Every structure is written in structure tokens, then in C-alpha cells.
Amino acid sequence: MMADKAYVTKLLKTARGQLDGILKMVEEDRYCMDISTQLMATEAMLNKINKEILTAHLKHCVSNAETQEERDQKVDELVHMLGKLMK
């Protein structure tokens, strides 16, 4: 992985903390809208992390590919992943 590992790790730990908090909210029968708000914040955090990783893929893995065939393969992988994200 070519993304900033410390940054990604920090964000993932924050997202994990958010999920733990949401689980506690569910267990405590908290208000639905409050739970939903926290879920959306966690989704946004995960999307930010994924953007960081995919950006690093483009900047490093794709641009440093040694052959055109390898670059094409890496771009195809990215396009396939983006197709999954947009469903």
C-alpha cells in the first residue's frame, strides 16, 4: 500500500471508535435519527479513507507500472472498483 499508512491507520481507528459508539447507541435504544447521523459520519470517514487509498493507487501503482500492459491492468482494476462504489 502506497497511501500514508499513519494517516490511514489513524482514520481507521477513528472509524472503529465511531462504530463502537454506534453499537452502544443501538444497545441503549437511542433515538433512530441520532444513530443514523453517526452511521452517516462513519460512512463519510470510510469513504475518505478509501479515497486516500485509491488516490495513492493512481499516483504510485499506476504511474510507476513498468509496461503499458501493466498500467492498463491497474487502470482496469481501478475502473472495476469505482463501478462497485457507484452501485
Image (tube, rainbow, N blue to C red):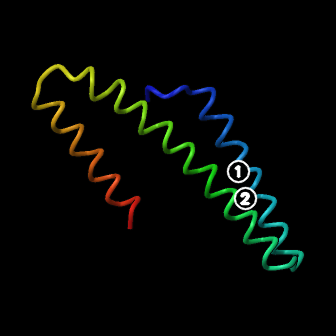
Residue 19 badge: 2
Q: Where 11 sits versus 3, above or below? A: below
Q: Quadrant of residue 6?
A: top right
Neighbourhood count class around disc 1 (C-alpha, 10 Å): few under 14, some 14–19, many 20 upward? some
Q: Quadrant of residue 27?
A: bottom right
Label 1 belongs to which residue? Answer: 16
Q: Quadrant of the N terminus?
A: top left
Q: Position of residue 57 (x, y in %)?
A: 37, 33
Foreground pick, 18 / 83: 83
Residue 26 badge: none
Q: Where 33 sits versus 51, above or below? A: below
Mark 1 residue element: helix
Residue name at image x 44 percent, y 26 percent = 2
Q: Position of residue 56 (x, y in %)?
A: 42, 30
Residue name at image x 87 percent, y 76 percent = 30
Q: Quadrant of residue 60?
A: top left
Q: Tell me if label 1 and label 2 are in contact, CB under 8 Å.
A: yes
* Amino acid type, mark 1: Arg
Residue name at image x 70 percent, y 50 percent = 16
Neighbourhood count class around disc 2 (C-alpha, 10 Å): few under 14, some 14–19, many 20 upward? some
